[in-house]
Amino acid sequence: MNTQHQVILSLGSNQGNRLENIQKAIEFIHQSVGTIVKVSNLYETPAWGFDGEAFYNCALVLHTQTDAETVLENVLNIEKKLGRVRTETEGYQSRPIDIDVITFNEEIIASKNLTVPHPFMQERLFVLVPMRDLNLDWRHPILQKYLPELLKASEDKSQIKMLQSLDFPIKNIALDHFNYIAIEGNIGAGKTTLTTKIAEDFNAKTVFERFADNPFLPKFYQDQNRYAFPLEMSFLADRYQQISDDLAQFDLFKDFIIADYHIFKSLIFAKVTLSEDEYRLYRKLFEIIYKEMPKPDLYIYLYQNTERLLENIKYRGRSYEQEIPAEYLDKINKGYLDYIKSQADLNVLIIDVSDRDFVRKQEDYVFVLEEIHQKLKNQ
């Protein structure tokens, strides 16, 4: 189930360097509004509703976790940044950039500032033709028609010329070069959220750790000494079974898979929680299992300082996590970093997100993607 909204934007320019205006708008949208996952070809279309220079037009698909009104506010700011001046004059005018919110999922929105779907989209080929390039299974929620039906019914007879394809930021980030990525981090680091976002944006298969129903976890946080060994053995058995079953569904040589854990985390947590004798026994069992497990092509460790981890844990509100001491989180962080140093054969990327919020701030998510992109370039 998607956690992000799917938004279609229509871009147009008929003043100044039209191509440059479109390209800058795409870059600004990706940096501050949401992740652009598809862009249409670029078209030249006649001015619609007034006499003016021909427009360059395109459409794009955006993934965002913000609401529709915020998307509108953000794209209006981008228009202003690119020189668009809105006046009180009635009718259409030439402009360096025009960014319209065409759809927001398949929702119907009628507010003071925004109407979605765009009320005139079905009348305008400069919107419909670029949208066709996006190959979406989208149905107009009011007209109950799919895009081919809207195109067929349109009375707009404008001559539209396809000019070229357009680049967009994530098009050049070939994450699927890594068939299998594992994202790890301490409790509250955001590994599941990041896994979900990347999977949606890059169309990857997902493997998620299923741990919420572990009966020993709440007991462990109440009495660590008593429940540490059964907890860690339970986690190990569950993780082995889960990851074996989940990865068996995919082709590790063809599919692009991203997981929010790697089975080695079992050993890291066990070293922190178990007594010395228990840990020796546990490690023997772990090593037997570990030999059988496929290793990720890229292992990403999300580092967050303990203060931020405690904030995140409090924010997500799981009752059994609220009493986790800072010292425990410190030990887990140290365990991960010691493990990473010892793994010469593992392709590791450490990303410090202590001062980043890749859930609420698009620029921080773009930072994470760029870190992965640089790792890919240096391979």
Image (cartoon, rainbow, N blue to C red):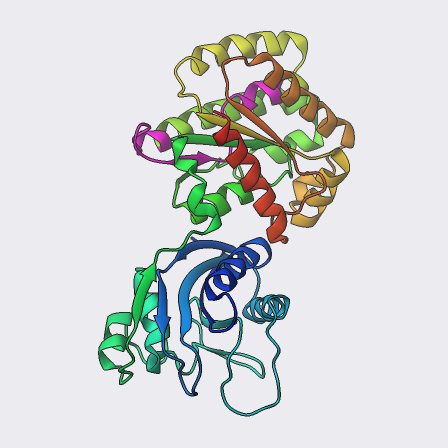
| Vertical position of residue 244 compared to residue 108: above or below | above
Please provide percent x and percent y for residue 65.
55, 58
**Residue found at the very far bottom of the displayed protein:** 90
| Vertical position of residue 119 compared to residue 24: above or below | below
Question: Front-most of 15 and 363?
Answer: 15
Please provide percent x and percent y for residue 335.
66, 20
Q: How many marks?
A: 0
* Residue 266 among magenta residues: yes
| Vertical position of residue 263 compared to residue 158: above or below | above
Please provide percent x and percent y for residue 180.
41, 30
| Vertical position of residue 224 compared to residue 77: above or below | above
Res 66 → quadrant: bottom right
Left or right: 51 as drawn, with respect to 78? left
Q: Residue at x 70, y 28 (%)?
A: 223
Q: Work out whether residue 272 can be spotted.
A: yes
Q: Work out whether residue 214 can be spotted.
A: no
Q: Residue at x 42, y 61 (%)?
A: 60
Q: Residue at x 57, y 27 (%)?
A: 349
Please provide percent x and percent y for residue 191.
56, 38
Res 165 → quadrant: bottom left
* Residue 181 among magenta residues: no
Left or right: 75 as drawn, with respect to 251? right
Question: Front-most of 345 and 242?
Answer: 345
Question: Front-most of 360 and 165?
Answer: 165
Q: Residue at x 31, y 61 (%)?
A: 133
Bounds of the magenta span?
246-270
